[in-house]
Image: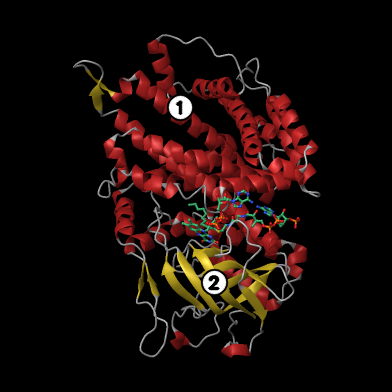
Amino acid sequence: MMLFLSAEVASKAGGEVSSFGQEVISDQIFTWVTDSEHNKPYLKGSGRDAFGKWKGELITGEGWRSLQDFGLSKGMVATGYDTPYGAFCRPLQFLRTHLWVGSCANVGCPSAMQDGAACLLRRHLSHPELSAALSAAEKKVFTDAYKRLTSRDPKHAWTSGQWMTERTGGSDVSLTETVATYQPEGANGFASKQGQIPLGPWSINGFKWFSSATDSEMTVLLARTAAGGLSTFLAPMRKHDPEATTLTGEPKDDGRALNGVRIQRLKNKFGTQSLPTAELVLDNMRGWMVGREGRGIHEISTILTLTRVHSAVAAVGGVGRGLGIARAYALVRDVGAGGRKRTRLVDSPLHMRTLAKISAEYHRLMLVTFYTSYVLGVSEHSLDARPSPALDALTPQKKLVEPLLRIMSQLAKAYVCKPSVALLFSCMEALGGVGYLVNEEQEYLNISRIYRDTCVLPIWEGTTDVLCTDLVRAMKHARGGADSLAALDEVVRKAWGFEGRAGRPAGWEPVEKWAALKSKIEGTEQADLMGEAREVVWQLGDILASVLLYVDAGTDGNPVAKEVFVRFVEDKFGVERRARGSTEDELNKDLGIVYGHGGD
Ligand code: UCC
Ligand code: FAD
């Protein structure tokens, strides 16, 4: 995804990214993955002991913990914060994440929420007005947590949870039953000791139905307050920090006691089995309010933006690994090819057509995902220099970057995660029966595990339909909607006008298609659009994907990229199909798409 990095960043960081790509498929990493699948998290003891004290203690396996430490030490989150690459630090971070996904046994889930929490706290600490509104204690707590969330030292670093879902609803959180009451220090034995910071002035009580990062050191959650409406809170998971540097207010002998949290039970899941997803009872959990009271959704949406980009990256990362395995398998597997003749799969025109279709779709979804990561980067850092003619064509004027991100983060999650499940299934099928096996001892072959883990991506962080309804609401929003449409307008037009090395096939008319979709969005009542929200999002996704493919193909004149672009617009934009070549010619084109031959 070099399109979204400057030449300078690509040359400085490229070597490290390729060696990281090798490290994540090492025997050591695969041993940890196998261990985290075998030694699943469990609750040691449950219910109450003889003295009535709650006993359920979360135990995670060594493989899981080692993968967490590896990811933290490699800066899977920190790269987005501490590298000197400005807007490009996000595409770089997600390029590395993409490589990590297939090997991380879901530790990418806590790190996604860690990233979201870091982003939220950075916003409050760096924005002049927001930071001025913080008390000295809040500033200290937020600063300390931020440092840990962006640390590369596994002993010091924190991951974070994100608790929104309750039994009453996950898509719609308006019926949230968890309640936060303001009870500043001194109450309930949470007095601050000298030199220490109390756990938080709010007492939070309720029940959270899904908590995926239960072994995190902090969480960000929604709760209702007396003023009405939902607010966002930061709460440490433990009462005592062994280094006694932050957020602690409890005597040392309280050890690692949870901060008013009881793990009711762990969820029994189809996939993500290494991930400790739990139901939690909150009984006087102490926390800090983040942002304004009653503006909880608005506040936590900063986290949603990040976790939705992570979800899309996880989806393409999974497909990338699946395809890598399917490609390698095709080079070694012989199959019957009529009569007694046998042939290598790589020589089968049909098998290569199948893999070429998967590869082309993967390429398109990668572009949408990494474009979103670039927009995220540009929203966080201004671009000092013109990055490249191609990126100029894809970058809207500064004031429209935020409204574009508002669209792209939901669009990428919906448009990328859902088809990725089917693509990964096709990769599994490409290995026949071997693909369906749980290849625990041969983790390098284990597509079935990645498939199971990928299936959750269209569900958590907003189901596909919920994201589509949110996207329609965002485009119709009284304040931001017009800017979002203007941002899309600018990008589609500028990208179509990009004078690259790929021609514009007759009949490919993204500007006209977008204009028609835009006037439909503007001219239809929001309620009337909701029934077709998914079609609206997919039409928009296809338009954006086509211009991204066009700019990508035109940037370096790579014939494979051009072939992928032309096939897509033939399929989706009614462009007249080219005459088919001989079987051998078609096979060669498919081989180019699958194995990447034919580049400059
Ligand atoms: O699933 C979860 C974690 C699992 C693990 C994650 C791992 C990550 C990836 C790892 C990869 C390996 S946590 C639970 C996630 N839950 C959801 O995503 C909930 C889905 N539901 C929605 O997204 C809904 O649209 C709600 C809950 C956000 C809707 O709530 P409301 O109460 O109806 O709120 P509104 O009216 O839609 O939004 C309130 C305000 C509006 O702005 P104002 O106040 O100016 O009108 C919205 O425009 O918040 C704004 N807003 C947003 N802004 C709402 N959503 C967003 C957004 N996404 N971005 C920016
Ligand atoms: P519902 O909201 O009941 O949805 C049911 C169906 O209704 C879906 O198909 C949905 O698309 C549809 N639907 C809902 N609303 C609408 C609408 N307005 N229009 C059209 N269709 C609609 N949550 C957390 O807060 N923290 C976590 O750490 C966490 N971890 C999770 C881990 C796993 C493995 C899983 C599976 C879930 C996790 N979740 C977590 C919960 C997850 O975010 C929710 O399951 C998800 O947001 C959907 O909510 P729900 O389960 O209540 O489904």
Instruction: Tell me which corner region of the image, top left, top right, bottom left or bottom right, holds residue 503.
Output: top right
Residue situated in front as seen by the camera: 555 or 138? 138
The residue that appears at 52% across and 56% down in the rendered structure is 112
Q: Is residue 501 visible?
A: yes
Quick check: 349 above or below 531?
above
The label shown at residue 517 is none
> Which kind of residue does numbered mark 2 sit on?
Phe
**Rendering colour mode:** secondary structure
Residue 50 x, y percent position in the rendering: 35, 89
Identify the residue position indicated by label 1 in the image. Answer: 357
The residue that appears at 72% across and 37% down in the rendered structure is 488
Identify the residue position indicated by label 2 in the image. Answer: 207
> Which kind of residue does numbered mark 1 sit on?
Lys
Q: Nearer the viewer, mark 1 or mark 2?
A: 2
Quick check: 302 above or below 134?
above
Find the residue positioned furthest to the left.
340
Q: Is residue 12 visible?
A: no
